[in-house]
Image: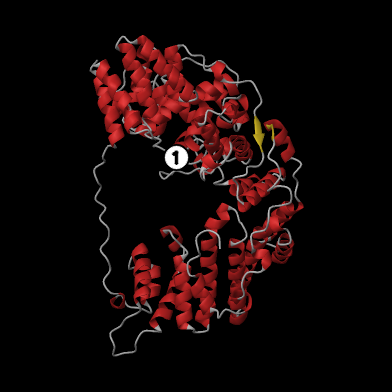
Amino acid sequence: MRGVKLVGWIACLVLFGGTGHWGTPPSAEAQPPPAREGNANAPITERSVEELRDALQALRSPAARQLRAAQDALPRQPAEALRLATLLQQDPLFLPYGLQLEAAGSRNQARELLAGGKREEALEAAKKALALYQRAEESCPSPVAVRKLPEELGRTEAVAGEALHARQQWPETQKLYESAFAHFDSVDLLMGFQPETLGRYAESCARQAPPPPAKPSVSPTCAEWLRRFIQLEGRTSPKARAITKHVSLEALGPFPPAPSRKPTAPTMAPDAEAFTRAMALYRARKFAEAAAAFQALPEAWPASPHVLRARYWRGRALARGRKPAEAKQVFKALVEDAPLTWYGMLAATASGEDLQARISSATPKAAARDAALDSCEQQRLERAEHFLAEGMAPLAAEELQGLASREPARLGAPFLLYLAMLHSEAGDDPAAFQAVAELLRRKHPGALTPFALRLLFPPRHLEFVQKYAAEHALEPALVLGVMKQESSFRTNAESGQGAIGLMQLLPSTADGLERGTGRLLFQVEPNIRVGTKYLRYLVDYFCGNRALALASYNAGMGRVAGWKRQGLVGTDLVDFIESIPLRETRDYVAQIIRNHYWYSSRILETKARPLEHFWPPGGAAKTGRCAPKPVKRKTSGR
């Protein structure tokens, strides 16, 4: 079996006796199918990215169309879904999907049989589903399917456990439910079990307890699981009542004390402390000492997120310390290493480097295959290509997950560029960003081309962006820059604080701007419409100062007002950004200004704005209310 061995699998084999569908070893077709002829051993050739993109359209696939039809049929036409699932299993490339669909159909059938009182047939259907899921796990499924398989097994084992409970096979019921619980590795999933399920499990535990007058007890494993379920929702919850109907709290033994929720004092990382000390030297005008301190940070912590900051401020310290030649050398090296970053922009301005001259006009070449891919990765790549050709982008994104992030150094640059294109075509912009970032780290020339810039700064939903940006007198580049930082263009993005969608708005904020839109934030147009309105409000509130508006969009208006009271809002944009106490907000503001530059100059082909556009002169640094009326504050959506 590839990957992590599924929890409880051997125990279930023993329970079901090792016979029939369940007990037999996987058939030959369950083994990882070989890569299709000509792919694994064919010579790897490079072609222009445009040629490769056009070639995708020729990879139409009847099997992919059958899969889409089967998924559509499963809820309403289970017989048709089963027929299509059987056909899919005849194609080695799409075998995992056929097996998973048939398994889901068998589990649904088991539920229906149980509802009709047909326990034996239900148990056989559940056993069949479990065996199919086992075969699917061994047939190179997508990474998403691999992550979901334990949950699917757990749900199927719960159905089988219900059938065994009806047959009063108490030891088998207990073990099967415990295997089902073990497949759910998060609190949220465990809380999905219904009271009746937990009641059946508790009864199976109680039926094996010693009879009176022995002290009430259950097995240690039963006690541990039952205590956990009771602690999840409380001793008076319906689930706790379902459990204690069969097993008393006394029988479960002592409950562990609740974990302490006392907040721990935040500590600053040593690299952040080093940067803070160096910046203090700079602000004290001890420029030689500051330059040395900034230089020491990358040497001590080469992987620190503060490396580019330290390199830029070292250049500033050298310039202020009357060492212009050394400062220019530092800035030029920073532009060379990080031309598309905020600090690369600042360094280019300081040294007179032309960032635009670094972008080649050539169309880069890429390779559609890579020798480092294993056989399952080859299959996943082929399925993704077929899904893209058939307009099934979400499934393509699932298949491509992890290809670029699992040891990216093993993959050749031409293939990484192709993979970045596939991720973008599949709508998985974060993965495309990651692949291009690796190419930039390698200083691959294909990463500094218009093609790669469009992958890094995609103009998603441009029609709505332009419409509502114009309506609220904002630049489309600013709106796109916010969307890139807030959600990476994921329409289904949802933060831990409840911010939703492309522009990460709280429903309460949206409703305060337009009544009823809080429930529409997963939709593209309402989210952009209300998001641009809120952004315009913040720009007006801060008297046209876009940097303060962006900081408020991320951290909240109250925090920005507090920073003003602390003396952190001055008249210099760069100093203000560096003074922002929250790293998330500091990076957020800087990166949106960086996004704005590249969207303006290269993607939308409009004029790039100077830094003063974000920090206008005069009274623009005020945090006084220029807007007529406040709206509910939007807290950080990240």
Q: Position of residue 546 (x, y in %)?
A: 43, 22
* Residue 543 against residue 486 in the figure, above or below: above
Q: Quadrant of the C terminus?
A: top left
**What sort of colour scheme is used for the picture?**
secondary structure
* Residue 169 against residue 509 in the figure, above or below: below
Q: Which corner quadrant of the image does residue 368 belong to?
A: top right
Q: Position of residue 493 (x, y in %)?
A: 50, 42
Give me the residue at 48% from left, 33% from top.
485
Q: Is residue 546 left or right of residue 606?
A: left
Residue 418 visible here: yes
* Residue 560 against residue 328 in the figure, above or below: below
Q: Which corner quadrant of the image does residue 446 belong to?
A: top right
- Comparing 447 with 475, the one in front is 447
Identify which amino acid the numbered label 1 is placed on: Leu
Q: Is residue 266 left or right of residue 155?
A: left
SS assignment at label 1: loop
Q: Is residue 520 left or right of residue 199?
A: right
Q: Position of residue 202 (x, y in %)?
A: 40, 76
- Comparing 557 with 110, the one in front is 110
Give me the residue at 40% from left, 69% from top.
239
Residue 624 visible here: no
Q: Position of residue 57 (x, y in %)?
A: 74, 40
Q: Is residue 583 left or right of residue 448?
A: left
Q: Residues within 10 Å of mark 1 (few under 14, many from 20)?
A: many
Give me the residue at 26% from left, 71% from top.
254
The residue that label 1 is drawn on is 506
